[in-house]
Amino acid sequence: MQINYYQDASLLENYVDIHYREQDEEVRSLIAFLDAGQVITGRKEQISKRLFLKDIYYLEIVDRRCFAYLDKDVFQIDYSLKLFLEKYWSSGFVQIGKSLVVNLNRIDKISPDFNMRMHLILENGEQLVLNRAYKKNFMESLKKGRRKQSENH
């Protein structure tokens, strides 16, 4: 892979473009690395804080507001679930309910429940219910994630 670096003092913001003929493992790894460093802004009371996507366990809509749940903290963010997924799906986020999105990288265990639902137990011990209407998409995303992991090792 050829890498070029350019410094331009007239830029208002740094940016990275990735050009590829085919999205092979090398390109996917680079995208995953760049996505892991992505940051959004969250608010709690009067304080704004930078949130790394990799630190977000799940998102939930409550009273038309979107909240990002971290290990032990919750922040309001200025996204709808649809917009967040459009922008950050490649970082491992998948919708599991009408008002829930989970970070696949933060799931510790999956246990079945009645009525074809499943419980997702996150690394911090929290449990989320996977709604059966979202199960097919979730399972496909999970398989893709496992395939990526096995290709990386």
Image (tube, rainbow, N blue to C red):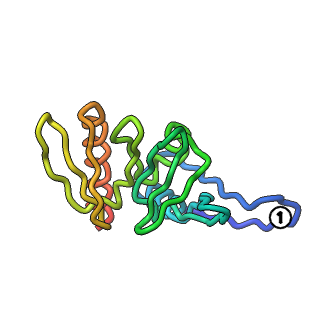
Q: Nearer the viewer, residue 89 or 108?
A: 108
Q: Residue furthest top?
A: 133
User: From what the image shows, is residue 124 above or below residue 59?
Assistant: below
Q: Nearer the viewer, residue 129 or 105?
A: 129
Residue 79 position, x and y percent, is: 58, 44
Q: Is residue 27 left or right of residue 137?
A: right
Q: Is residue 105 left or right of residue 73?
A: left
Query: Residue at horizontal 26%, vertical 48%?
Result: 143
Secondary structure state at the residue bearing disc 1: loop
Residue 147 position, x and y percent, is: 27, 53
Query: Residue at horizontal 39%, vertical 54%?
Result: 103
Q: Nearer the viewer, residue 11 or 127?
A: 127
User: From what the image shows, is residue 36 above or below residue 101?
Assistant: below
Name the residue tied to disc 1: 8
Q: In the picture, which quadrant includes the C terminus? A: bottom left
Q: Amino acid at mark 1?
A: Asp
The image quadrant of residue 70 is bottom left
Residue 58 position, x and y percent, is: 41, 54
